[in-house]
Amino acid sequence: MSTRSLDLGCNDCPRNPYKFDELYAIDLSEQQLEGVTYRQANLALESIPFADDTFDCVSAYDFIEHIPRQLLSPNSDAIILPFINVMNEIWRVLKPGGHFFALTPAYPHASAFQDPTHVNIITDKTHEYFCGEQPGGGIYGFTGRFSATRVERVIPKMAETADHSFGRLCYKWQKKIISPGRFSHLLWELKAEK
């Protein structure tokens, strides 16, 4: 059986961190991508347009910081929580044991704030709202559950794949000779518990 990877917010360069057999992608803009099953969607307001338990991996490179934490519903005066909804959708489309692989600029690094479209500042503890036996995000409507496989500060170019051996080697090397201020991004590797 073939393995499937979905990349969120791909623009014209979808990524496949585990090098799975089939690559799917979603973005706001219209794209024509060769060898990729592509869907156009606004994930701040729409569901992921795929069935439950479809993917072995969902990836998000420089994406989750663009998903608002709160919005006024376009159809009423109600407040909706797009970030919680996106995390629910990621969990929904992942197969049991599937991985969410996210790389995002994180607080307190300047890259988390400098882009005016970064509306969701991620910290070293944000993932905890989606992990554990009773995730804290449950009080806001998160219905899934992840376990954290890996959460660490990284230099983005050295963490673009899920290759643990290479990633760990680079991480140890980075820690020894590179200033801690260069670790601009946070890497989440979360496993869907179903």
Image (cartoon, helix red, strand yellow):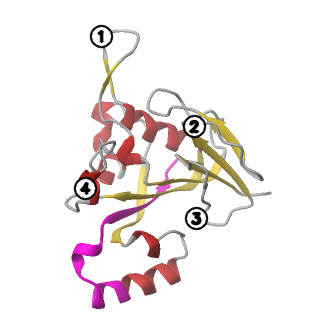
Density class for disc 1 (Cα within 10 Å; few <14, some 14-19, many ≥20) is few
Residue 101 is situated, as x and y percent measured from the top left of the image, at 49, 58
Residue 44 is situated, as x and y percent measured from the top left of the image, at 44, 32
Q: Which residue is mark 1?
A: 77
Would you place residue 114 above or below residue 73 in this image?
Answer: below
In the shown orientation, is residue 122 left or right of residue 67? left
Density class for disc 3 (Cα within 10 Å; few <14, some 14-19, many ≥20) is many
**Count of numbered circles on the image:** 4
Labels 3, 2: front one: 2
Q: Which quadrant is home to the N terminus?
A: bottom right
Instruction: Give me the disc on residue 17.
Output: 3
Task: Tell me if label 3 and label 4 are in contact, CB under 8 Å.
Answer: no
Would you place residue 85 above or below residue 62 in this image?
Answer: above
Q: Which residue is mark 2?
A: 29
Residue type at numbered disc 3: Pro
- Kind of element beneath mark 3: loop
Density class for disc 4 (Cα within 10 Å; few <14, some 14-19, many ≥20) is some
Q: Earlier in the sequence, mark 3 or mark 2?
A: 3
State the extent of the magenta-drawn residues as a range: 173-194
Q: CA distance from mark 1 to mark 2?
A: 28 Å
Residue type at numbered disc 1: Asp
Q: CA distance from mark 3 to mark 2?
A: 22 Å
